[in-house]
Image: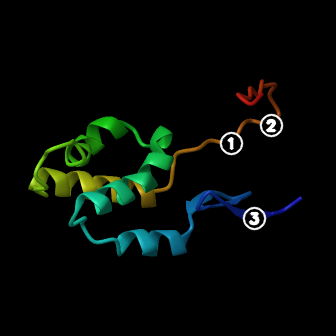
Amino acid sequence: MVCEGIVLGHKISAQDLEVDRAKTVAIEKIPPPTSVNYVRSFLGHPGFYKRFIKDFSKISKPLCALLEKDVKFVFSDESLVSFEKLKAALISTPMLISPDWSAPFELMCDST
């Protein structure tokens, strides 16, 4: 078995789970969007991890409002706060707990 590996941008080992440093550096360097296309492109990244970001829809609402039809692109302070919160969520380590291997537990899977 592998002792350590990177899965979906997270470094997983027997000791802990941490965000891959290469990923955090790249995300920290992303500048605020300057057009609708940049907003759409940026939202693709946190959108992939949205199930792990608490209140994703509330946080991303100001950015999503910029994508509405016939809306002038105005990147407000509220949009900047939303952008920074989503960047912070992408580079923070998720809270995962390893199971107690000595106790019985059930593993459920959603695949078909």
Mark 3 — residue? 4
State the residue at coordinates (77%, 25%).
105
Label 1 crowd bin: few (<14), some (14–19), many (20+), radius 10 Å:
few
Residue 98: percent from left, percent from top:
68, 42
State the residue at coordinates (77%, 27%).
112
User: Which amino acid is tagged 1?
Assistant: Ser
In the rendered view, tell whether residue 106 sits above or below residue 25.
above
Residue 10: percent from left, percent from top:
60, 60
Q: Are marks 2 and 1 in contact (CB under 8 Å)?
A: yes
Mark 1 — residue? 98
User: Which amino acid is tagged 2?
Assistant: Trp
Q: Quadrant of residue 55?
A: top left
| Nearest to viewer (mark 2 / mark 3) | 3
Query: Element type at marker 2?
Result: loop
State the residue at coordinates (10%, 55%).
76
State the residue at coordinates (36%, 40%).
56
Q: Work out whether mark 2 precedes mark 3 in sequence or the reverse, and give the earlier one.
A: 3
Label 2 vs label 3: CA separation? 19 Å
104 vs 34, left or right, is right
| Nearest to viewer (mark 1 / mark 3) | 3
Q: Work out whether mark 1 precedes mark 3 in sequence or the reverse, and give the earlier one.
A: 3
99 vs 26, left or right, is right
In the rendered view, tell whether residue 31 sits above or below residue 12.
below
Single out the residue that lies furthest toward the front.
70
Give me the disc on residue 101: 2
Residue 33: percent from left, percent from top:
25, 64
Label 1 vs label 3: CA separation? 15 Å
Q: Are marks 2 and 3 in contact (CB under 8 Å)?
A: no
